[in-house]
Amino acid sequence: AVAALLVALSCVACRDPGVLRRHPEKPHARWRWNDQARTYRPPGAAYDEDLGLIVTGFDHVCPWTGTGIGEKNMGAFHAFVSLLCVCIVL
């Protein structure tokens, strides 16, 4: 279980959380301007102050992995938290 926990931790820490590239022009009607990142962002995306980027499906910054948790690494994060609970119980 510890080996699987370390693999899940590596996947969360090394995987792209869903960083969006900059869009200086409005690509879609529903996208909104973000002053902090100086780019347009789609609905559901948020500016992460720690990363200084727009992340799709942004949830939070994980202090254990040191990365933002977003749309693309959410599955690996859930696996990491679940395996952490299993290791604590065992």
Image (cartoon, rainbow, N blue to C red):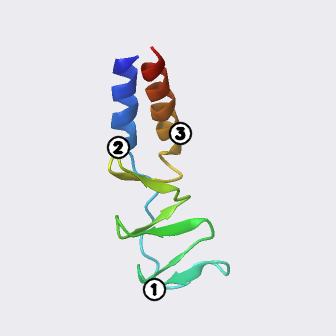
**Separation of disc 2 and disc 3 at Cα?**
16 Å
Say above or below: 68 vs 73: below
Question: Residue placed at 52% from the left, 45% from the top?
Answer: 74
Picture quarter containing residue 52?
A: bottom left
Q: How crowded is mark 1: few (under 14 residues within 10 Å), some or many (20 or more)?
A: few
Q: Is mark 1 on a helix, strand or loop?
A: loop
Question: Residue placed at 38% from the left, 45% from the top?
Answer: 15
Q: Which of marks 2 and 1 is nearer the N terminus?
A: 1
Outermost residue toward the right?
29
Residue type marked 2? Trp
Question: Residue placed at 38% from the left, 70% from the top?
Answer: 49
Say above or below: 28 vs 82: below
Quadrant holding the C terminus? top left
Q: Which of marks 3 and 1 is nearer the N terminus?
A: 1
Residue 50 relative to residue 25: left or right = left
**Separation of disc 3 and disc 1 at Cα?**
30 Å
Picture quarter containing residue 36?
A: bottom left
Q: How crowded is mark 3: few (under 14 residues within 10 Å), some or many (20 or more)?
A: some
**Callouts 3 and 1 close, C-beta under 8 Å:** no
Give the label, 2 or 1, closer to the camera: 2
Label 3 sits on residue: 75
Question: Residue placed at 33% from the left, 35% from the top?
Answer: 10
**Separation of disc 2 and disc 1 at Cα?**
29 Å
Label 1 sits on residue: 35
Residue type marked 3? Gly
Residue 70 location (% of width, % of height)? 50, 53
Label 2 sits on residue: 64
